[in-house]
Image (cartoon, rainbow, N blue to C red):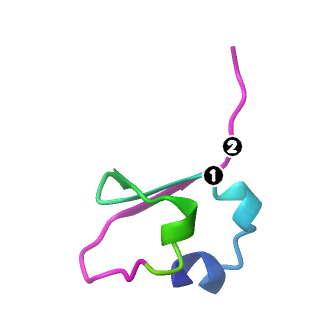
């Protein structure tokens, strides 16, 4: 996903990527093109119990 590259986000910290509420698999992220109005959410890996 060009957005991740544009903002130089470390790919290993982009654990959960959603576009319009839908999970984007890591292998699909480079192929996914964003459209005007898309909402993107990116979360790092988290730990807890």
Give coordinates of residue 30: x percent, y percent: 53, 79
Residue hosting label 2: 45
**Which callout, 2 or 1, points at the residue further toward the start of the chain?**
1
Residue 37 drawn at (x, y percent):
24, 75
Picture residue at 75% right of the left edge, 59% below the top: 12
Q: In this rendered view, identify the residue nearer to me: 25 or 46.
A: 25
Q: Dots 2 and 1: beta carbons under 8 Å?
A: yes
Residue at image coords 68%, 36%: 46
Left or right placement of residue 46 versus residue 32 in this view: right
**Residue 14 included in the magenta stretch of the image:** no
Residue at the image point whose x is 46% and y is 81% from the top: 31
- Is residue 41 magenta-colored? yes
Local packing at callout 2 (Cα closer than 10 Å; few below 14, some 14-19, many 20+) is: few
* Prevailing secondary structure of the magenta residues: loop
Instruction: Left or right? Give the position of 3 relative to 49.
Output: left
> Dot 1: what SS?
loop
Q: Which residue is mark 1?
A: 15
Q: Quadrant of the C terminus?
A: top right
First to last magenta residue range: 32-49
For the residues labelled 2 and 1, the Cα–Cα distance comes to 5 Å
Q: Secondary structure at mark 2?
A: loop
Residue drawn at x 68%, y 43% is 45
Q: Nearer the viewer, residue 37 or 14?
A: 14
Few, some or many C-alpha atoms within 10 Å of disc 1 (few <14, some 14-19, many ≥20)? some
Q: Which mark is residue 2?
A: none
């Amino acid at each position: 996903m060009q957005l991740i590259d544009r903002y130089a986000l470390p790919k290993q910290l982009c654990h959960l990527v959603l576009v319009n509420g839908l999970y984007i698999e890591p292998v699909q992220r480079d192929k996914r093109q964003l459209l005007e109005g898309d909402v993107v959410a990116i979360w790092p890996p988290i730990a807890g119990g």
